[in-house]
Amino acid sequence: MPFLILNLFGVLDAKRSGEDAVKSYAMNSGCSYSIIRPGRLVGGPYTNLDLATLFQVEGGASNGVTVQSGDALLGDCKRDVCAEAVLQCLENRECEDVVFSMHRFRASSATASMTAGVSAAAAAAIFLSYPARMERDHHHDVQYSISRETIQQHTTSNNNIMTAWSSSLLDSNYWLRSNIPTKCEAVNNKKMDTVNNNKTFASNTPATVYGEEEESNSANGRINYYYKRMNPNDVDRTSLMESHAIFGPLWGEGLIERYHVYKRINTNNEHPQIVLQSPRELTVVDLKVGKKLNGHDGIIHGGIISLLFDEAMGWAYECLQQQDQIDSSGMIIVTANLTVNFRAPFLAGSEAVIRVYHNETKGRKIYFSARLESKDGRVVFAEASSLFVLARKDKLRMKER
Ligand SMILES: CCCCCCCC(=O)SCCNC(=O)CCNC(=O)[C@H](O)C(C)(C)COP(=O)(O)OP(=O)(O)OC[C@H]1O[C@@H](n2cnc3c(N)ncnc32)[C@H](O)[C@@H]1OP(=O)(O)O
């Protein structure tokens, strides 16, 4: 079809500028993008005002599609299939940073064909048609019912984030992690599968902590750690409501909206046991920042990020103290040095996790490292390292008023 007709009223120009905006946002924020250029949308729901809607064009019985990189295809695309492709792009890393056009496969088969330019993996991801998807969702439902029992067996307290190993009934690639028994997530052992999780295990709770150490951590394939909430029960700095930087003045809507601290508890044969490894993960903070803590418009201030790190490392010290039974009588722990590298803009309103690792202890000096990253671990916003020093309370110079 001639470009002039296709671009009537500047439609294609508008689409192109939309795509450019998506790409530049992705580049600036460190996330990936997938751009789908479907053919004319046909099939229900009939919401727009074109001829396909007027005549309720179904687009044929096939859910198969043909995809090709760039912009070469011309044809129809069913709305539901297009929606499916969007979901597939969200779920599959192979679809990161790809641009492709997609139209209805014209043969009667429910499979799809692929033409050059889109990677086989991306195409394979996109090609899942509805029947395949429904089967998969059903599979996930089965996982859910089994895993809930598994989680209940493993759960020691409602405040625990559980990592429960699925029984042999489950696909061995999946394991489960939950912050309370009825709200759980299935996570693919090798690759996060968060979209399915959210769909299958609708969660009202904000705190879900992801990890990346499951492979190195599991000699026999079992997951052998879980996380236990430290605040407000275990150690309660929220009691410093009035004066504590995070839980006081900077706490609330638009400010720091969530700061849940979890300590990692390693287990061996399901009995809690400390596994010594260095650097070892001590704490994970599940946090959410609001929209009133910016430096530049829409970007969280670096000083706030440093504060979030400093606090997280303070909790890591608490954790270390509990585990290693550091004798700190008459002493106070303070930050002597904190170095932060800002890797990607941390956007206002974001949720993220901070993971804190213990690197080394030398006498009174304790070295930590930490990472502020997206919940799925795919974007690192900042990294930090610190030196905490145990100082004698009576020697600590307090500034006189
Ligand atoms: C559980 C609660 C968590 C709370 C989380 C929040 C923590 C905070 O934000 S605390 C507030 C910010 N920090 C402060 O106010 C600390 C102010 N600084 C001080 O009081 C002192 O400089 C202090 C205590 C760090 C060190 O003084 P002091 O105890 O006399 O020890 P000092 O002998 O100077 O140093 C001890 C060791 O640390 C090293 N060290 C001290 N400071 C640094 C530094 N900035 N960089 C590198 N090394 C350092 C020294 O070289 C020395 O090493 P070594 O033993 O190998 O010779």
Image (cartoon, rainbow, N blue to C red):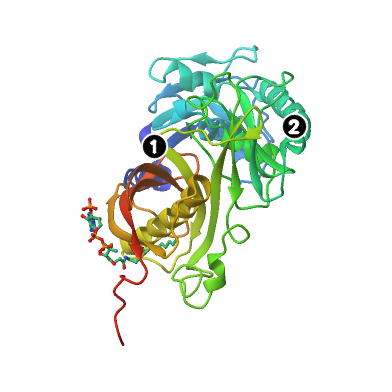
| In the image, residue 198 above or below residue 68 | below
Q: Earlier in the sequence, mark 1 or mark 2?
A: 2
Which quadrant of the figure has residue 23?
top left
Q: Secondary structure at mark 1?
A: loop
Considering the image in quadrants, where does the N terminus appear? top left
Residue sticking out furthest to the bottom? 401
Q: Could you say which is closer to the camera, residue 231 or residue 8?
A: 231
- Using the rendered image of the protein, determine whether residue 102 is visible from the camera's viewpoint: yes
The image quadrant where one finds the C terminus is bottom left
Q: Estimate how packed mark 1 is, as few (under 14), some (14 to 19) or many (20 or more) residues with alpha carbons within 10 Å.
A: some
Q: Which mark is residue 279?
A: 1
Whole-percent x and y of residue 7? 40, 40
Q: Position of residue 151 (x, y in %)?
A: 73, 36
Can the viewer see residue 298? no
- Alpha carbon separation for disc pair 1 and 2: 30 Å
Tell me the kind of residue under disc 1.
Answer: Pro
Ligand 1 is in which quadrant of the figure? Answer: bottom left
Q: Element under label 2? A: helix
What type is the residue that disc 2 sits on? Answer: Thr
Q: Where residue 286 sits in the image (x, y, percent)?
A: 52, 52
| Residue assigned mark 2 | 150
- Quadrant in the rendering for residue 309: bottom left
Residue visible at 77% across and 35% down? 153
